[in-house]
Image (cartoon, rainbow, N blue to C red):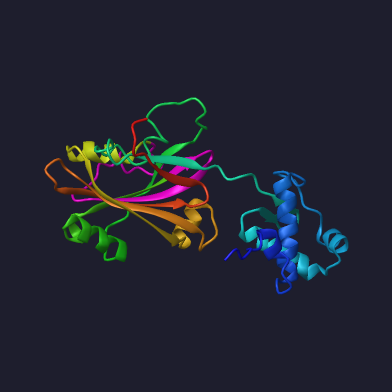
C-alpha cells in the first residue's frame, strides 16, 4: 500500500523511454507553457539537434510523434508549426426531454443565423448514393426492417468553426427523395427535411455510441488522416406509432466534439 506512481513527466524520463519520445515530451511542455504559441514555427531540425544534443533523425522522430498527436503541423518545404487548440463542440442529448427528433445537431446548428456562427457553418448535402449491397446499406435495411431496395440514402457533412466536423449518412424507407432535398451543397438540417418529405413526425427510438478509425472516404471528407479516431453515433428514429422511419450513422471527428447527457432540469 502507498506505492508512489510516477508522474507523466517522470514516466517520460524513465531510462527505457526512447530518446525521441523524451524530446517530444520536452517540446510538448514548451507548447503547453506557451513558449511555442499556436501558429508559431518550431526551430529547425539542426537547431533542435544542437540545443538538445541529439541527431537530426531523433528530432525528426520526435516531431513526427507530435504530428501524430495533433500538436504540430508539418508543412513540407516550409517548416513545422504549432496547431491551435481544438475547438470542442458540445452536442446536448437530454434523455428525458428530447423525445422528438429535431436532428441530433440542432443544438449546435439551429435554423437561422446565430451570433458567433461562422460563415459556412451548417449541414450540407454531399451526395445521394444508390443503395446497393454494401455492409452499411445492409445494416440500415436490417435496422429498419426493410430490404435494401426499399431504402433511399443521403449523405451530408456538418461544418462548424470553418471546418468539417462530422460525416453523416441517413437511410429512409421511401423514395425517390425530392431532387432539391438531395442537391449537392444544399444547406439545412436534414432530419426535419426528411421528415417533411415523408409526411411524418419523427421520435427517437434508440441511439448508440461507438468509435471507428476514419476510412479513406471519411478521412477525405473530414480533412483528417486515415485511421483518425471518429466518434460514431447511430440509431433509429420512428413514427409516433413505433414504425422505424429513419436510420442515421454519424462519424464525428473525436478531437473536436463531445456528447453531453443532462439528467437534471437546467
Q: Is residue 251 positioned above or below 196 on the image? A: below
**Membership of 130 in magenta stretch:** no
* Image location (x, y in percent) of residue 54: 83, 68
Residue located 86% across and 59% down the image: 47
Quarter of the figure with residue 96? top left
- The answer to whether residue 52 is visible is yes
Q: Is residue 133 positioned above or below 203 on the image? A: below
Quadrant that contains the C terminus: top left
- The answer to whether residue 61 is visible is no
Quarter of the figure with residue 95? top left
Q: Is residue 23 positioned above or below 17 on the image? A: above
**Identity of the residue furthest to the left in this view:** 241
- The answer to whether residue 234 is left or right of residue 15 is left
Between 196 and 88, the one lying in front of the other is 88
* Image location (x, y in percent) of residue 250: 37, 51
In magenta, the rendered stretch is 158-187
* Image location (x, y in percent) of residue 176: 21, 47
- The answer to whether residue 224 is left or right of residue 65 is left
**Membership of 186 in magenta stretch:** yes
Quadrant that contains the N terminus: bottom right
Amino acid at each position: 500500500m502507498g506505492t508512489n506512481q510516477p508522474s507523466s513527466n517522470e514516466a517520460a524520463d524513465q531510462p527505457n523511454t526512447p530518446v525521441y519520445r523524451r524530446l517530444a515530451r520536452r517540446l510538448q511542455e514548451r507548447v503547453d507553457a506557451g513558449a511555442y504559441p499556436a501558429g508559431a514555427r518550431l526551430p529547425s531540425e539542426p537547431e533542435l539537434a544542437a540545443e538538445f544534443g541529439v541527431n537530426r533523425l531523433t528530432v525528426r522522430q520526435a516531431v513526427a510523434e507530435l504530428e501524430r498527436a495533433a500538436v504540430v503541423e508539418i508543412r513540407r518545404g516550409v517548416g513545422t508549426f504549432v496547431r491551435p487548440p481544438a475547438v470542442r463542440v458540445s452536442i446536448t442529448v437530454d434523455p428525458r426531454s428530447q423525445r422528438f427528433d429535431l436532428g441530433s445537431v440542432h443544438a449546435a446548428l439551429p435554423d437561422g443565423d446565430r451570433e458567433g456562427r461562422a460563415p459556412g457553418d451548417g449541414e450540407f448535402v454531399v451526395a445521394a448514393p444508390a443503395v446497393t449491397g454494401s455492409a452499411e446499406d445492409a445494416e440500415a435495411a436490417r435496422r429498419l426492417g426493410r430490404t435494401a431496395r426499399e431504402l433511399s440514402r443521403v449523405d451530408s457533412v456538418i461544418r462548424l468553426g470553418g471546418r468539417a466536423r462530422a460525416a453523416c449518412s441517413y437511410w429512409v424507407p421511401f423514395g425517390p427523395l425530392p431532387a432539391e432535398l438531395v442537391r449537392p451543397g444544399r444547406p439545412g438540417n436534414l432530419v426535419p427535411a426528411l421528415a417533411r418529405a415523408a409526411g411524418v413526425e419523427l421520435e427517437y427510438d434508440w441511439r448508440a455510441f461507438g468509435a471507428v478509425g476514419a476510412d479513406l472516404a471519411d478521412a477525405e471528407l473530414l480533412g483528417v488522416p486515415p485511421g483518425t479516431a471518429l466518434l460514431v453515433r447511430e440509431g433509429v428514429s420512428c413514427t409516433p406509432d413505433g414504425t422505424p422511419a429513419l436510420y442515421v450513422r454519424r462519424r464525428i471527428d473525436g478531437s473536436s466534439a463531445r456528447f453531453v447527457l443532462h439528467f437534471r432540469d437546467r
